[in-house]
Image (spheres, rainbow, N blue to C red):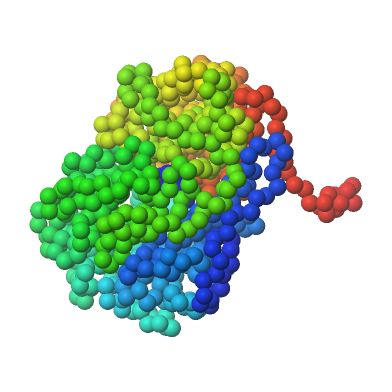
Amino acid sequence: MKKILWTILIFIGLAVIGYALEKQVEPAKQVEPAKPAAQATQIPGPAFKDVLSLKSVGSPVISPSGKDILFPVSQADWDKNKYDTEIWLSRDGTAPFQLTQTTDESSDSPSWSPDGRRIAFLANRDGKTSQAYLINPAGGEAFKLTNHKEGVSSYEWAPSGQFIAFASTEPQSKEQKGREKQYGKFQVEDAEYRMTHLWLVAVEPGKTPEAKRLTSGTDFTVGGFAWSPDGKKIAFAHRPDPLINSYHKSDISVLDVESGKITPLVTQPGSDRGPQWSPDGQWIAFSTKMGDDRYFINSKIAKIPGGGGPITVLTSTFDENPYMLKWTKAGLAFIGSEGVFTRLYLLDPANGNVTKIVSTPENISDVSFAEDGNAVAFAGGDRTTLGEIYRATLDSWKPEAVTKMTEQVAGWKTGTREVIQWKSKDGTSIEGVLWKPDGFEPGRKYPLLVIIHGGPAGISIPVLVDAYVYPYLEWLNKGALILEPNYRGSTGYGEKFRSLNVRNLGVGDMWDVESGVDSLIAKGLVDPDRMGAMGWSQGGYISAFLATNSKKFKAISVGAGISNWVTYYVNTDVHPFTRHYLKATPWDDMEIYLKTSPMTNIKKARTPTLIQHGENDRRVPIPNAYELFQGLQDVGVETKLIVYKDFGHGISRPKEQLAATWHNWQWFAKYIWGEDVVIPVEVEEEKEKDEEAKK
């Protein structure tokens, strides 16, 4: 469950290999542990492929009665080189079984009808678009509810259960089709896009009725939406266009479903989104930054009368970002960070008082509430478990695991996790997660690998297994320590801490990483001659900054990292990010861009550096990788650039994740352990014979 909630990369719907027919009525077998694959002889601990093959659970959805729980299960499909997701069902606490099976694509976004008699989900079963399907919880064949040309991106049941509202992107216009036919494909940047609008479809079992349009036009594109309790209105967020940098123009309006009349509700400057109705339909809660949309400023939960009126901010005293879940009869439930832990809170909408509901397990990533507001299902885990689905009641918190995902790693040597603190160069208190191998020996000096999270407003939390492109468990089993620093700017420590790297990017981050390393050296835990550092996205940027400004490390890996803020600013799809953190454009203050750019001190670089980057990355465009690569070559520093084809900011397919893991293992094995690792490649014998015959 690592970083899943907070990343905005974040990471990550995958899927299940196990097969269960949709026609089944009786529960099938419990989710089985992943079967171990043959391990490469030089890899201690689980094989890389075994870790990437672990099944994982997504957000649960509890039935209105509180008895049954739907949840997605994801896993790598190595043959098709993708992650697939299918929906599983636990009936009244019994062993879960697989409910859906979409052959070539995934099934996801499950939800219960208000009476609990039907289940809706999204799936692409015709190889074209994602549509809404309905299935009986008792089993049977799923049938297609929508047949919308551009597909369904999100949906919500009407309170009566007789209708479903859904969002869909508008089709390409006739003019655009004609232009493409005559002149080929091209696009005017920031000027051409397609809007998303709302539609309504009647729920008629066994039928695929025609959908009715609810919103239209080019004045706005629709975001999140919610039905009023009486089913007569829909509150929805919207903005002038779908461009990523228009997020701060998001407002909220209310649609009268019968008449089609739209009434503006929240029209203040800044981003206002995620509307939710109070149970009595009198109020609407929403997420807002009250006009200040800088990345490092706390978001807030506010409320406004459903018919319009003054806005009341409810979370002024909560010094973190609240992730709103549901307005229940007991109050507004939300999730928020508390240091390295993610907690469940209840907000009193009358006075703004915030109560922490529970602290176990250590991290709760999503919660679903039954009709009574007391029975819940949630996804959670801690440093001793994988992410599991639990059931519980708020009035007597005794979580009961519905899944047994942790059984997948039974017998694995996973080491231990500790939350540690240290003082940075300027006296700032920094926290991090220290991974120790099984059989850790006090007094022994270990190799150290520093893995730096992205964001910067991300966070590293103590979990049992982590992966992506870094072989955590294998390094532990090789006898290394791993440090994950929550450097200044990380989520979980309040708004002031998140703003400490404003006009201090790279510089302050390096203080935090180096001071954490120094604290471990001072305690006699680390061999200072065998240390490496790495990270992806913002973690990649900090790694690049270390590569050109620090001499502490023997090897560094830069994943999708920024090397030059000027290059980044003019190429990225999120220009405001740089202006918020550096408080200037390059043309206004080139000095701050130079101070915080790794390339500025390229001539000081001495550390062998691996660079990993997606070919089509828009968030951190690939010129950043080429610039660092060429600069390191020019100054004679050992470097290697690996470009992952057809990927954007993240590596999202299992085979390329496996390759990237091998690349990191090989790089650090050479410079930390002095080993030359040959990445294994399986060659089909028949192909070899054909080649020999040709010769």
Q: Nearer the viewer, residue 64 or 265?
A: 64
- Which residue lies at the image location 67% right of the left edge and 50% below the top edge? 37
Q: Residue furthest left?
A: 309
In the drawing, does residue 332 fall left or right of residue 10? Answer: left
- On screen, 280 above or below 430? below
Q: How many marks?
A: 0
- Which residue lies at the image location 36% right of the left edge and 41% below the top edge? 341
- Which residue lies at the image location 35% right of the left edge and 74% below the top edge? 116
- On screen, 449 above or below 271? above
Q: Quadrant of residue 662?
A: top right
Q: Position of residue 610 (x, y in %)?
A: 58, 30
In the drawing, does residue 462 fall left or right of residue 654? Answer: left
Residue 570 visible somewhere in the drawing: no
Q: Position of residue 603 (x, y in %)?
A: 52, 17
Q: Position of residue 656 (x, y in %)?
A: 60, 46
Q: Nearer the viewer, residue 314 or 392?
A: 392
In the drawing, does residue 382 fall left or right of residue 603? Answer: left
Q: Quadrant of residue 595?
A: top left
Q: Quadrant of residue 578?
A: top left
- Which residue lies at the image location 17% right of the left edge and 52% below the top edge? 348
Q: Position of residue 225 (x, y in %)?
A: 28, 62
Residue 300 visible somewhere in the drawing: yes
